[in-house]
Amino acid sequence: MEFDVIAQIAPYSLDKASKTKLLTERLLELTENHKENCPEYHRMLDAVGYDPDKVQSYYDLPFLPVRLFKELSLKSVSDEDVIKTMTSSGTSGQAVSKIFLDRTTSTNQQKAMVKIVSDYTGSSRMPMIILDCPSVVRDRRMFSARGAGILGFSIFGSKKVYALDDDMKLNVDELEKFLDQYAGQDILLFGFTFMIWQHFYKELVKLKENGKTFDLSKGIMIHGGGWKKLISEATTPEEFHRRMKDVCGISRIYDYYGMVEQTGCIYMECEYGHKHASIYSDVIMRRPEDFSVCDIGEKGIIQVVSVIPESYPGHSLLTEDEGCILGEDDCPCGRKGKYFDIIGRLKDAEIRGCSDTYATKFQ
């Protein structure tokens, strides 16, 4: 099944049976494609005795540990077809994942992002405030997960302004002019959680204490990159929401879960605080002792699958995060598919989210 066919389906419209059929067909095709075109992946499949005839659903497909992309250059296309190389976030001294994209995979990523995010924000592009600095995206051929996130979400902005300069200082004058120009309109804000807290929220608090406020009550904020640092400071997601509303009036705030190894397949948080899997991806919780599938409500290691990657074998990965499935097809928000919670990193796993790695450097 071609990705373009899948992209025509609304992202949260398929029930369990229909989604299982779609994912199984597409992921089997991707497995065969990568087996044929990535020699290292072929050897891995041979080593585990992979037999496509024994696959009853995508749950049965082999998965790669996400850390493998830090140790091997895995790609299923020629070097000439690679148009972009993305790297994961990492603290000083950490190896980073390298993800090789051809034009088809890059286009697939963008199409999936548009479908997913538009389900939350609407189809119209909005004036956009990027809660970061412009230097992050200057090298378009090779850039970090942070730059990839900014560029990925920038497609939803009609006019854009960076809230921070390259010294991570708040551009108060630029922000004021931008908000005056688009007063009364919905405005999209995007950034990474710790940076928003450290360089945006805390500066707005100082400004408010000196009598200067910004009205972002028409804003829609999307943020991601990890909560480790903020939770260590006793700032919960609920507290983050409350304080952001207090300081600037914004109430539509959506966290998301995602990773550079499967860019495009983000898991957006709904208004009930649940992360959702679209039809372009899924999550499976696995027990650490034998990798069997967890029951609903049972904590396990998160496996992620994606229908997007054609240029590298990243369609079935075992992460280093823990989570639990809360339910399927019955979230009060009305979106079909699995919804889940992220519990945190596995013990002794490296810090890797954009927000958390930045927080470590900032510290």
Image (tube, grey):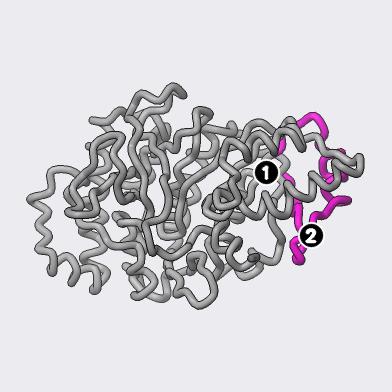
Q: Residue at x 46, y 71 (%)?
A: 96
Position of the C terminus by quadrant: bottom right
Residue assigned mark 1: 189
Examine the rendered structure and indicate whether residue 345 appears above or below residue 190.
Answer: below
State the extent of the magenta-drawn residues as a range. 158-187
Residue at the extreme right: 211
Q: Which of marks 2 and 1 is in front?
A: 2
In the depicted view, which residue is nearer to us: 161 or 248?
248
Question: Would you say 12 lies left or right of 360 here?
Answer: left
Q: Residue at x 24, y 73 (%)?
A: 40
Q: Residue 72 in the image: x percent, y percent?
A: 34, 75
Residue assigned mark 2: 169
Q: Are marks 2 and 1 in contact (CB under 8 Å)?
A: no
Position of the N terminus by quadrant: top left
**Quick check: can you spot residue 5?**
no
Q: Residue 85 in the image: x percent, y percent?
A: 48, 69
Q: Is residue 277 a member of the stretch shown in magenta?
A: no
Q: Earlier in the sequence, mark 2 or mark 1?
A: 2
